[in-house]
Amino acid sequence: MPVDYSLYLVTDRGILKGRSLFAAVEEAIRGGVSLLQLREKNVCSRDFYHIALELKELANSCNVPLIINDRLDIALAVDADGLHVGQEDLPLEVARKLLGPDKILGYSVSNTAEAAYGEKNGADYLGAGPVYPTGSKLDTVDPIGVEVIKTIKESVSIPVVAIGGISRSNAAEVKKSGVDGLSVISAILGSPQVEENARCLKNIWRA
Amino acid sequence: MPVDYSLYLVTDRGILKGRSLFAAVEEAIRGGVSLLQLREKNVCSRDFYHIALELKELANSCNVPLIINDRLDIALAVDADGLHVGQEDLPLEVARKLLGPDKILGYSVSNTAEAAYGEKNGADYLGAGPVYPTGSKLDTVDPIGVEVIKTIKESVSIPVVAIGGISRSNAAEVKKSGVDGLSVISAILGSPQVEENARCLKNIWRA
Ligand code: NI
């Protein structure tokens, strides 16, 4: 079944300020999130495992695939639908080998050289960005802008999702770059109206 | 080939104060370390992977098995000889399943209930402790003392290594508890005389 990359939520419990991750994800899916990535830092492996196990049940019951950020062991342990690796994670080709051919493997890129590397070494999709400045510590590189996103998208034949600072005010512009989806954190999880946030982005995507 | 648990070094780059991990491990093996565990915290997966890859080559060239702490993905990625999990890591039975039957799997315990659980759920050996107080943040439980170590050892049929605050001044006492080996960090890595530190502990073990 082809993956729907249109609205790709990456989790961050830090910005939930105590709100439940599971309730927020449930709302987000109701609002139109089509793909989910669990991203955890500074948590022990045991907790990561239990959160992943519960999120997988929740997401899969709504036919939304669950991707694990960075941690191949957690992805394998909960039989997640896929893994997302960045430039500081396990090498892409190592991840593909251990993950097997059938799981979704994503790769973070910020230029066409990394995109070419990703396409060649087993990535199913690319997360390209950061498009815009963000407050998130996810970003280790400067914003690359919509033009570079477009160039990356045109340089490969695998799906590309844009990430980094995407909001309802710039989502239409990002879509025009030709990408296959919008990947967001705070635009959905950053305020308590999670379902409404997701629905708004989804409507912009569909417009 | 049976594993030699007699002198089990757990790494901690923090106490090396800039000294090379690889040089220190090489010296430690020359001094008599028989088993090596790579323990890394607060390092990205990419760096963990590269350190593990290099340490595996070094250790295996000296016929010393390399065990990875906590991170099953790193263990799989570098084809390490084994994995060590604690109470906050992946569940033991999940780790065993993903690691396969042939790799060494260790489990941290501090009482006989955990020891029984470990023996039943796939552990090849137990790391019992902490025996004594330590400055290390490895410890989340109070020291259990040599008597409890002895009780744990007598309660299972798999090898048990003692860990936590072991030094040349108490190593003989720990050995008397009947354990299969001494697991140490700072007693070997805590001062620049790494080879001498290891040799001294090894001699106490053999006495
Ligand atoms: Ni549940």
Image (cartoon, coloured by chain):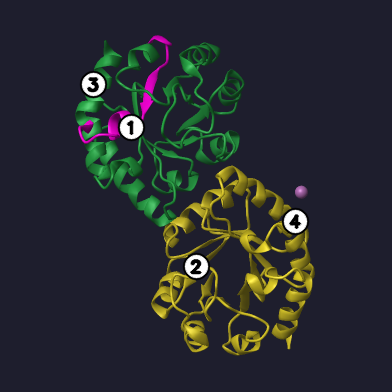
Chain colours: A yellow, B green
Is the residue indicated by label 1 positioned so its CB lies within 8 Å of ligand 1? no
Q: Which residues are magenta?
A: B176-194
Residue beneath label 2, please? A107
Q: CA distance from mark 2 to mark 4?
A: 24 Å
Chain ID, mark 3: B
Q: Is residue B183 magenta?
A: yes
Q: Nearer the viewer, residue A193 or B2?
A: A193
Residue beneath label 4, please? A58
* Residue B171 seen in the figure: yes
Q: Residues within 10 Å of mark 4 (few under 14, many from 20)?
A: some
Amino acid at circle 2: Tyr
Is the residue indicated by label 4 positioned so its CB lies within 8 Å of ligand 1? yes
Amino acid at circle 3: Cys
Amino acid at circle 4: Leu
The label shown at residue A141 is none
Examine the image and state in which quarter residue A2 appears: bottom right
Chain ID, mark 4: A
x%, y% of residue A144?
A: 47, 82
Residue beneath label 1, please? B186
Q: Earlier in the sequence, mark 1 or mark 3?
A: 1
Examine the image and state in which quarter residue A3 appears: bottom right
Residue beneath label 3, please? B200
Q: Viewer-nearest of labels 2 and 1?
A: 1
Residue at 71% x, 64% y is: A64
